[in-house]
Image: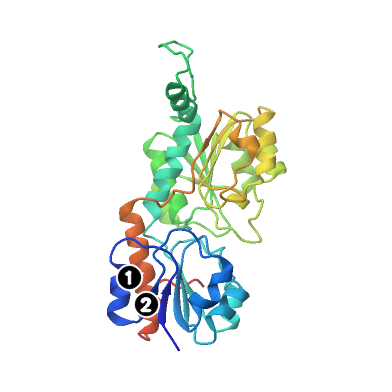
Amino acid sequence: MTVGVVVLSRLPGDAVERLRAEHEVRYRDEDSPVPVRDLPVLLSGAEAVVVTLGHRVDDAFLDAAGPGLKVISNVAVGYDNIDVEACRARGVLVTNTPGVLTDATADIAFALVLMATRRLGEAERGVRSGRPWGFGMFHLLGTSVQGKVIGIVGPGAIGLATARRARAFGMSVLLWGRSEPDPAAVAALEAEVVGFEELLERSDVMSVHVPLSAATRHLVDAEALARMKPGSFLVNTARGPVVDEAALVDALESGHLAGAGLDVFEEEPRVHPGLLAREDVALLPHIGSATIETRTAMAGLAADNVLAVLGGRGPITPVR
Ligand code: GLV
């Protein structure tokens, strides 16, 4: 029996209602990812499945859904949780939610730039824990961003939006990516497009925005970290495994890097104990897109992709 649409996690807004208006929907109104053992019962007969990042879509997942599956709609812009090749081999379309989360994620990226450079996590923890303090000329001195250089690794929509925020704070911008950034955006930012090594060497703050793939896993490894400017900062709002976390801990411990701001981790929700122990690292629990407006728009776009595919109109935002 086909069920039409399976929604594996609780979604904000009217996305589920809109799916229900046109299709039979099996809605799992819960936040935690589905245990793998429950997938066969939940997925069997699905034509479309709406998934969130905690779900790994692999051959076992696709087997559980069966041959009627037409589309996997990911409620995220990144889709490293999905084996796109396995989907393609079975003729299953994959969609994601680009665009609607650009500003929210860039806001968090620049918040992390400020948290790391101005030692905001350490300052807040100090006040909250009752650590003695009083205004002092040398108390919690940070580093100004004005007049400094931000290096954007991955100048896609979120990287460029982060660069715009950095410009507004008086920073100059270096860009490096695997594909050429839009020339109009480069001109508007008065940015320089440079090689990866030059970006590492010249950036006071490096902000990572590349998707996770075989080519970008540990792109920021011990060698790259060693090339970074002494006293610089690293921010990552993309995917944890793009940065070698153990090497990052070493670079902080040696004093080569002055600090880091991370919204993503190699083995979420686990955080490297070497990071947890450090005052010079700001740590957030993968909340780049976590505003009610943004998450509602993401859920809406994920639903629209399902409605478009099942309605025979083709996906709105397909993963190529
Ligand atoms: C969040 O990390 C996303 O990829 O949307």
Is residue 117 shown above or below 77? above
- Sequence-first tag of 2 and 1: 1
Q: Which residue is mark 1?
A: 16
Towards the viewer: 246 or 145 = 246
- Which residue sits furthest right? 223
Towards the viewer: 313 or 67 = 67
The image's colour scheme reads: rainbow
Q: Which mark is residue 25?
A: 2
Is residue 84 shown above or below 98? below
Q: Residue at x 66, y 61 (%)?
A: 214
Is residue 192 shown above or below 228? below
Q: Residue at x 67, y 46 (%)?
A: 244
Residue 139 place in picture, x, y as percent = 47, 15
Tell me which corner region of the image, top left, top right, bottom left or bottom right, holds residue 202. Answer: top right
Report helix, strand or loop for mark 2.
Answer: strand
Q: CA distance from mark 2 to mark 1?
A: 8 Å
Q: Residues within 10 Å of mark 1 (few under 14, many from 20)?
A: many
Q: Is residue 55 visible?
A: yes
Residue 39 place in picture, x, y as percent = 54, 73
User: Which quarter of the rendered picture does the N terminus lie within?
Assistant: bottom left
Check whether the beta carbons of the residues at disc 2 and disc 1 lie within 8 A of each other: yes
Q: Horizontal placement of 20 versus 209: left or right?
A: left
Tell me which corner region of the image, top left, top right, bottom left or bottom right, holds residue 48. Answer: bottom left
- Which residue sits furthest bottom? 1
Q: Residues within 10 Å of mark 2 (few under 14, many from 20)?
A: some
Q: Residue at x 51, y 65 (%)?
A: 34
- Identity, as a three-letter code, of the amino acid under mark 1: Val
